[in-house]
Amino acid sequence: MSLKPWSEIARPHKDVLEGTFKQSEFAADITQVATGTAPEEYQNAEKFFSRTYITEGMRLLLISVAQRLAGQGGDPVVQLQTAFGGGKTHTMLAVYHLASRKVSTDKLMGIPPVLDEAGITELPTARMAVIDGIQLSPSQVRTYGSTTVNTLWGELAWQLLGEEGYALVADSDRDGTSPGKDSLKQLLTRAAPCVILVDELVAYIRQLELGKQYKGGTFDSNISFIQALTEALKAVPNAIMLASLPESELEVGGTMGQRTLNSLEKYFARVESVWKPVGSSEAFEIVRRRLFESSGERAEVEGISRQFSDFYRQNAEKFPVETQSNEYYERLCSSYPIHPEVFDRLYEDWSTLDKFQRTRGVLQYMAIVIHRLWNDGNRDALIMPGSLPLDDANVRNKSIHYLPQGWEPVIEKEVDGPRSVPADIDGHHTLFGGVQAARRTARTIFLGSAPSTQAEMIRGVQTERILLGSVQPGQTIGVFEDVLKRLRDRLHYLYAEQDRYWLDTKPNLRREMESRKQNISERDDVIPLLKDRVGQFFRGQNHHFSGIHVFTPSADVPDDYGTGPRLVVLPLDAGYSRTETNQAYGQAEKILRNRGEQPRQKQNRLLFLAPDFDVVGRLKEQTRIYLAWRSIVTDIENGTLNQDLSHLKQSERSRDAAGQSLGQLIRETWKWLMAPVESFVKGRPELSWEVVTVPPTAPYLVKSIEEKLREEEWLVYEWSPIHLRKVLSDWYLKDGVTEVSALKVWQDSCHYLYLPRLVNDQVFRNAIAQGVESEDYFGFASGKEGDRYLGFSFGRNSLADLSESSLLIERETAAAYAEKLRAAEQPTPPTGGEVPVAGGTIPPAGDPGSPQTPPGVPGGQPGGAATPQPAVTGTAKSHFYGTVELDAVKAKMDFATIMDEVVQQFTAQLGVDVTISVEIEARKKDGFDESLQRTIKENCNVLRFSSSEFEED
């Protein structure tokens, strides 16, 4: 179901549509009605009640008036005391028309149910007296024919009974003294049923200076009159008085006004019934009836209201709690086409302003708003705080009319208007401009915060109420949350504290910040800070990199094998973009190819992290903002900048918020991970770059980078021997070459970009160790002497040692050599009847190649008898020791061979205890220097030598 605009459902009254309404007509004037000079809608009883919503307070009052006039009870005196514009004059008019009507009560809309509730079938017509303190003057007399009236009691008597009534108080009127209670009782009895309406009484009596006689009497005589009148009314069962007393200081006036009010309240309190003023919920219907001819079909109104209610419930965490109840849905229906938040802000916030009249002020303000929205073709589903056309001169002037000086430039620049900041934001960002997010948000903040003052402990509009006043169903809430942050960062008169926002006529420190921001140097301030902040993302985190170099010149990036690759974080002027002019490639290639002025050898040990070219501009701006706020906080704390505590707190919050935004933006900026690779084109290596993004939301940057490197296989953490074998066959073991230096293969993998990039040499060692466990890949040897491999491994466990003599052997060659070793190790079986004896074997007789037959064996000396020989026995040897001298230069390789060929023969047997002792002797004719002696001793201690000494010959 689509959201139909309010202008297609509701229709305002003709005067509102055409803009022909007079604001003064919203101010009901009881005297004009009494004299027959009021506008038709107030003068005609039928039209008056057709546009009047009978509130709870008015209903109870009309019941009491009806009962009183019918002599069935009711209150004799009703005090109408409420804030400026609370509806008391309108209530008096309702009583006036009910009591003095010239038509039957059934023609007065809303009155029959009131009379039914009062239990009255026939309501008598009453005499009326209207005492208007603004209309009357204590110094001026009024003439009615031949009768001259001076005082309030003279005026009352004349209006009720004419000359007959005036005669009852004539003497008191001429003397300016209050008539007695009995005289007033007699007057009321003759006039009954009667209604006395007294408006602006304080405004009349406060003019009377103490001790001074006026034609209208003295201050004390007027107070005495009110006391006598209220007492007399109690004695007349079908007479009633309604008197309005002000509540606001603006209406009370000065010292005499307050003294008058205090005196009147004391006497009224004895007999009066306090009237209940208009509630904000009732204001919905009051305003709607006066401004709208029709609010639309009930079904359409409920449909729109239901969509708003469902939207609030579906996003409960974003809106105030009260929006989740069904009662709020009812409020949406009853206030349509005006959003309840408009009424809440006007009645709860704006009504606190001295010049703002509650009901009358809302009517005047909303009439101007509705007229402008209708003519502008507004398409909103409801008239919301965000809908207020503050760019219109009439609406803007009416808004600032109630506010202190200084608001007009704030509205024009920071709230609404063609040159305002919100209009600029909407105009330059389609995402915002499509829903006028910036302007709607700024208007909502204005309506909710403009009436607040600096004296208030808690100021501003909460975020949830800003969203309530600006977002419509179907719109993305996040767009308005985002634009709220934009406004906070750009507006000079907008304040923010936690989740509250408010506008003020006093500028915040943003203008100071903007001024300082312009003076911040990129080279001296921005880049050093960013270098430090980027570096913080890598500190204190475990990783496999040999070094992380942030904004480091090529000469300072080491050219070594290291314990891992090196990550180079490129500076701001090396931004990556997908366009042809890519700054990152050029800067990275300079570091990759050279170390300062010298060619770089270990190129395959470098990886690069590049900034996003499109974000670099915003990052520089955000850095300047942060530095500006930081300097402001420092200057306020040091006393250099004279500001109060509230501005210090604001600047601290702004600094912290700018710092947080800077951190997030840094992550968004350095997100391009670059790996150099080379492929052969026409026999020559050609450089290219592989690029991937690092998620900016990952909690740990280094971990995220390593995960990407592992995922893309740009950095090898575990290397299968099959891949090593392929590298060997592709680049080394071909064209008759059967062996290659293992150290060279490892170093080449660090040099050349077309070879795999290994984390470190341990990954290479592990690949060799795994490969030689089987006979499927290659062989390994610690060295070679002639045709003999030293420390040869193929098809068995071995620790790969990377030294200059270490060799990787082609598989077939290694297999052939292993077979040769196995053949050499097998013993030669006896042949031709050889008999094993101690010291050798006896070949068969007559063997010409046989050595001389030992004596005493048959077939020996001719004719000799056989001599018995002792049995051949073998003694088991249980102890082995061996001593060997090693060449000091080749000791490392030779010792590895000894371990493989001798020691492992013992350790492979069960139950063999092997002890190895190393004896080192070194001599130098001119002696060893102290430094060398100290180094040797420390190393021997670390290696746990049992004894180590330097001696003199």
Image (cartoon, grey):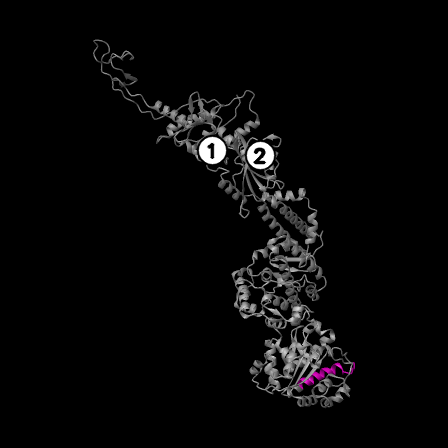
Q: Earlier in the sequence, mark 2 or mark 1?
A: 2
Query: Where residue 423 sits: x, y (%)?
Result: 65, 56
Q: Real-space Cα distance between discs 2 and 1? A: 23 Å
Tag 2: amino acid = Leu
Q: In this view, does 109 lie to the left or right of 643?
A: left
Residue hosting label 1: 764
Give the number of the disc on residue 592.
Answer: 2
Q: In this view, does 510 lie to the left or right of 477?
A: right
Q: Which quadrant of the view contains residue 552?
A: top right
State whether residue 680 appears in this view: yes
Whether 874 is drawn above or below 551: the answer is above
Give me the residue at 75% from left, 84% from top: 151
Query: Where residue 925 sits: x, y (%)?
Result: 55, 20
Whether 842 is drawn above or below 572: the answer is above
Q: Which quadrant of the view contains residue 932?
A: top right
Tag 1: amino acid = Phe
